[in-house]
Image: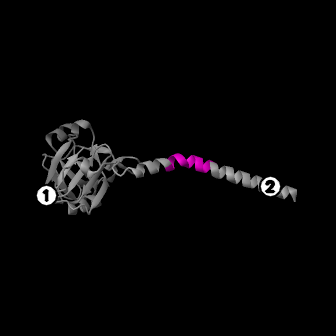
Amino acid sequence: MENDRRLTTRRKFFLNTASASLVALAAPNILRAQEIGSDVNSTRRNISSFRVPNWRDHFDNLKNGVILSDTVSRMVQYWSEDESVYKLYPSSVPMTDELTRRGYTRIIRKVVGPSWRPTASMKARNPEFPDYVGPGPDNPLGTHALYLSWQYYRIHGTNDTRKIGRRSSNGCIGLYNNQIEELFALAKVGTQVKLI
């Protein structure tokens, strides 16, 4: 009987000690989550900890909707003009900083089933590129393309899904085909765009 009581007491001791240890280990994370959650104006973060900036950090207004492409986090954000729609998409980004253009632009044209011609500089870097690729599964622009006011720059789909989340483009921003189709339907000619 005495042995049973000692065993029960030991079990309670170890269970209480283990519980206290778990609470002690979790406390810094709980406090950090409370700190992040308490600052409404702080940059939102997802579980992989890339930054998700607010549109107000980059645009004066939401007229015609806005698209923010972050080449560091490799993601594209969209906000509708009335702020009722918000989307976040993983993206491919240019292979090098020399190929990356940053700043403000806008959508000037939308094309379903775009064709593709490499620029002279693309052909110089990759002489094996064909001179022209029509719409279809071999097209590097995927199923939809949003043409920007900067010549040769687009936000487009890709038929090579391995490129998403990587530095893999010759200057454009690439999305999965199903996601560019969704963004294509949301955005319009005149949508404001910024690449950072």
Viewer-nearest residue: 30 or 169: 30
Give left or right: position of 25 versus 103: right
Tell me which residue sits at (41%, 49%) in the image: 36
Q: Which mark is residue 189?
A: 1
Give the distance between the C-alpha atoms of the residues marked 1 and 2, in whole angstroms: 75 Å
Quadrant in the picture for the N terminus: bottom right
Residue 29 belongs to the span the image colors magenta: yes
Q: Which residues are magenta?
A: 21-30
Give left or right: position of 157 versus 49: left
Q: Residue 76, how many percent across, how many down?
A: 28, 52
Q: Which mark is residue 7?
A: 2
Give left or right: position of 53 versus 150: right
Viewer-nearest residue: 184 or 124: 184
Identify which amino acid the numbered label 2 is placed on: Leu
Tell me which residue sits at (16%, 38%) in the image: 121
Viewer can see residue 135: yes
Answer few, some or many: residues within 10 Å of disc 1's Cα (few below 14, many 20 plus, some between 14 and 19): some
Tell me which residue sits at (22%, 53%) in the image: 67
Q: Can you tell which quarter of the image residue 3 is in?
A: bottom right
What predominant SS class does the magenta segment belong to? helix
Q: Residue 77, how many percent across, how many down?
A: 27, 53
Q: Secondary structure at mark 1?
A: loop
Numbered disc total? 2
Q: Secondary structure at mark 2?
A: helix
Viewer-nearest residue: 9 or 111: 9
Q: Can you tell which quarter of the image residue 195 is in?
A: top left
Q: Residue 180, how many percent across, how many down?
A: 25, 58
